[in-house]
Structure formats: structure tokens, C-alpha cells
Image (cartoon, coloured by chain):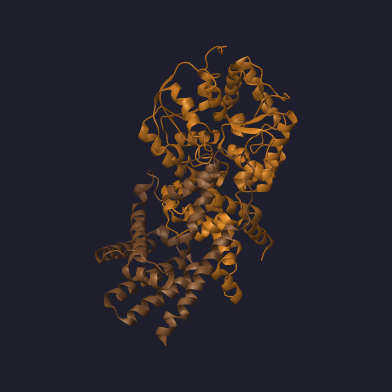
Amino acid sequence: MIEYLIDGPLWYFALVVFCIGVLWQLASIVFARSKTDLSVARGSATGGAWRNVFSRFVPHHEIAPQIRIQVVAGYLFHLGLFALLFFAAPHVLFLEENLLGFGWTPMPHWAFIVSAQFAFLGLIMLWLRRVVNPVSRLISTLDDHVAAILTFVVMLTGCFALLEGSTALRLLHRFTVEIWLIYFPFSTLMHTFTFLPSRAFTGAWFGRRGIDA
Amino acid sequence: MSERLERGLETLRGEIDGKVKSFFSSCVRCGICAEACLFYTETNDPRYTPIYKTEPLRKLWQKEYSFWGKLSSTLGISKPMTEADLADWEELVYDGCSMCGRCSMVCPVGVDISMVIFKVKHGLAKAGFSPEGLVGATQRAIDIGSPMGITMKAVRATIKHVEANTGLKVPLDVEGADYLALLSSNEIALYPEYLESITKIFDHAGVSWTLSSEAYEATNSGLQIGNKKVAGQLVQRVVDGAEKLKVKNVISPECGHAYTALRWEGPNFIGKAYPFRVVHILELLDELRDAGRLVTTGMEHERLTFHDPCSIVRRGGIMAQPRNLLQPLAENFVEMADHGAMNWCCGGGGGVSSNERAEELKLTAFNKKKSQIDALNVDAVVTACSNCRMVMEEGVEVNEMEVELLGLTEIIAEHLVEKRPE
């Protein structure tokens, strides 16, 4: 019964909530009212938007030494998670069989282990900093902690599911993924998508003024 | 709910657009912006973290636009926003932020934090949570035409002195001139050498220009306090003056926020595009230099550096021009660490210097600029913003530093060749 629920209705419900929620959130940003800037542009807003979407992946060298922990931990976590999500063998197989109908070459086991270590290390570093650093502690919200812990649990159950190969652990992982998907559109996890319009808006602003941000 | 709170919240609601939604939705509270803010780096007080200064707007967004906020409200379990949510942020936003925009350069998800802080200021100003110093300056700007209470009489007196010193006529209310030059209060009261310099330079370059007896003040207290209505009123005065004299261009003076108010925000404040071009004095001087109409001779022998005014460089896009103009005149020019778009603020922008309450904090924030200057061992710091100059002069004085503050336009005027080549 539980297996049926997790593999069936709850999975589809989570997927629907995730897809509609994400689209709704993005639509509320893209279609929100916005005023036309009446000043005469010095440069291209479109060029600035595109430039900013990519340039923000690399921090300004003037500030890089002060933010080394956030940058290193951030990249370890995000790259590790991305690799696990799209290149872990069980995920590639799952996506092929359940969603896409095609697959791609998964990463070898050793790469999985390295990616998982990167992702765990990065996430733990980021969360510890959030708890310990006075600035991060002050500005963090409950949502930030819930999102971090939920992601950690999903990754952890994923490792269990892979290593043990038991149905119970597979179901546990899938169940946590479903909770994560349902929580996603209504949480800080949405930054996965909303960083793009955010960077683009700001880049367009700088671009109009002829500033390379 | 009190009337002032309702007024403030209503204003903040009006500020929540697609940009703000994307900003708050993407912010992961990493705290990187703190490292870019001199109010944080010089005090180590986490409350000065830039994104924290946007809390009133973020709270409102979370409460009224997010799923959890709406759900809590529906269930009747959410706490309503109170006057404290606005009042407690007044000091952070007005005293502890110079609107320098350095935070907006470093945010990994691209939040323009400085823009959001301005929106918060708008809400606080509407609710009446603004510092007395700025309220007074704004009132003087509305009543008298200048935040420092400078009247046209004072401008005429300055004009007389300039004419006596230079032997040149300062054109006033000349219809059909190519350029209408504006002044900031500081340039009338503290640095009249600016007017003297542009009088010499424009005579040298053959520029057709004028001052206006109705639109001489470029500073905009409305922008500093965050009151868009007042900001629009003040911009409209300039527009009316320029239209009356039928000028083709309006020159923004050596004042950072005046440039932002006039060049970038002005048309949005008044709701229409200008029938003239707005050009910063540095842009114009560089254009004249490029066209061979501004010819200088000799060099400054002192060791010089340039302080980038935030509103002109980082938020205004005028980065190459001051260097094009200064470097040929400076034998021993050195750049500050972090110069250009990432330079550190003087600490007194965004209305902080007009806010007496912020005096001590402003001087603490100046320590960042002090360390930059000390590292270079220079004789003089050149800048192109009268407010930066005033703030740095005070900082230099208080810290007993052996360094001189100079205005870029004056240096150029001192090096003009005797006669313009035909």
C-alpha cells in the first residue's frame, strides 16, 4: 500500500505541484507589472542582462578573498548535487524509464562517490556557516534551514538507497524527494530558477547605464 | 493599524514589482553583501548587512505574496506588521547606507540591493520615519529651492566673485544656449571654484552655455530621503527652467546623487522623457577633449589618486572619462586598490552627509577610505563629486591626515592653454 502510494499517486501529485508551482512562481515574476524606464539608455539592456546572467558565476576579484568559504562551499554543493541529480546511474535510468524515454551515459561509481562527497561537504559547510556566522545567522529564515535540512535528508536517503539496494530504502528516498518537490516552489529552493530573472533584471539595469556589472 | 503605518505599507506594496519578486525569491541569505558594505566592514555589526536593510519590504512580500504568508494570513496565525517594523529600520536605512550600490555588484543571484533599499526608503519616508536632518533639507528644497537654503541671491553673489576673478562674463538666463549648467548647493556655498572653473573652460572651448535664475540647483533631497513625489517636483523645476531657456543640453555638476536624480531617475520621477540631453560635466569635458576643444598644458607634480564617486561611476557608468581627463595632467598618478566600479564609498552618500544623526557612523565608515588613501601615500585625492569631497575633507581633518582634496574640474581649469587653437 505504502509502496503503491509513494511510487504512484504521491509521486504524480508531487510532480504536478512542483511543475505548476514553479511555473506559477515564474509567471508571477515575468508577468508582474513593471514600469518602462523613461531615461535615455547609454547601453544595451539586453546585452547587460545576458552578460550579468553569466558574469555572476564568478565573484569580483576585489571581494573574492573575503567570500572564499561561501564560493567554494557553494560550488562544491551545487556542482555535486547537479552531477548526482543528472548523472547518477539510478537517476539516469529512472528518468529514461519514467519521464523522458531516453537516457545518457551515467557517471561511474567513483564519480558518484566524489560528487556525493562534494555535495555533502558543500551543504554542511554552507549550513554550518549559516548557523555560526553572525551575519548569516541574523538574516537566515526558517525556510533557509528547512530547505537545507530537507535537501540533506534527500541526499542522505539517496545514498542509503544506492548502497543498500533495498525496497524500503528506495521508497524512503523517493518519499523524501516527493516532500522536497512539494516544498520546492514555495521556498527558497526556488532560487534554482529565479536567480535567472533576478540577474537579468539587474544586468539590464546596469546595461542601460553602460556599466559592466 | 495606525494611519502612518498604513501609508507606509501601502507605499511599500506599490514597490513590489517583478524585479522585487525575483530578488526576494532568489535571495539565499548568503551574507556576501555584508563584505561589500563599508558600514558592515568598519563596524562589524551584522545589522548593517545590506540585505537586512530591506527587511520591511521582504517581510511584506513574504506576508502578502508568498504561499506561506498567504496561508498564515488565511488561517489567522500570521503576525501583522507593526510600526516597529518600519521605525526600527530607519537608522539602518538612512544612517547606515550611503546607497553606494557596492552590494549590488557582488550578489551572486543578482539582487540589486541598493535599488530595494531605495524602495524601502520610499515606504519609510511616506510613513514619516525619516531623520530630521533630511526632512529639513527636503523642506528647504521645496520652500527655498535648495536643501542648504541657498537662494538666487547667493548664486548672484558667487557669480559676481567669479566674474571679478576671471574677468569673464557668467551667462545667466541666456535663451537658446546650447548648455544649461546646474550647480549643487555645495558648489555654491563651499566650492565656488567649480563655477569659476567651468566659466574658464567653457570660454576656452567656445561652449555656448548659461545658468538659469529659476533652475540653478541640481541636488535632489527627494531622492536622498526616498520621496519620489518631492524628487519629481525638484526635477520638474530643472525641466521647466531648461524648457524656458530652450537649451539643448543640461549639465549635471560634480555631484553624484544630482546626476542620478537628473540623468537616470528624473524622467521616471516626472513620468515623461526630457526634450533635452542630460550630460555630466565629466562627460562633456571628455567630449570637448576628444574634439580637440579642450587643450591643456603642464602637469601636476604631486602624487595623485582618484576617488570614484559611487553615483557617477558605479551607478552612473562614467568610469573612463575622469581618467581620460586626469591622467594627462598627473605626472604621478596612482590608482586606489579596488578602483573603478568596485571602489569604496566615502561614507557620506545617499543623504548620510545631510543627516546630522549619522555623523559618528559616517566617520567610522570613512575609515575604509582612509585605509585606501593611507596605502597609497599620496599628496592629494582628486574627485568629481562635491559631496564626496566634503565628506573626505572632514574625514581627513578628523583623522589628521596629510592629504589634500581636489576637484577634477578645477585641475583641468588650472591647466588650460592660454588661448584655444583655431
The residue shown at (30%, 72%) is A159
The residue shown at (36%, 30%) is B377
| Quadrant position of the C terminus of chain B in the picture | top right
- Location of residue A98 in the rendering, given as x and y in whole percent from the top left corner: 42, 73
Return the residue nearer the eye: B192 or A40: A40
- Location of residue A156 in the rendering, given as x and y in whole percent from the top left corner: 33, 72
The residue shown at (40%, 59%) is A134
The image quadrant that residue A100 belongs to is bottom left
Above or below — where is B167 with respect to A22? above
Above or below — where is A95 with respect to A191? below
Chain A hue?
A: brown
Q: Is residue A185 left or right of residue B374?
A: right
Q: Is residue B138 visible?
A: no
Q: Outermost residue, left direction?
A: A110
Return the residue nearer the eye: B386 or B324: B324
- Location of residue B341 in the rendering, given as x and y in whole percent from the top left corner: 46, 40
Chain B hue?
A: orange
Q: Is residue A71 visible?
A: yes
- Location of residue A106 in the rendering, given as x and y in whole percent from the top left corner: 31, 65
Q: Is residue A76 left or right of residue B231?
A: left
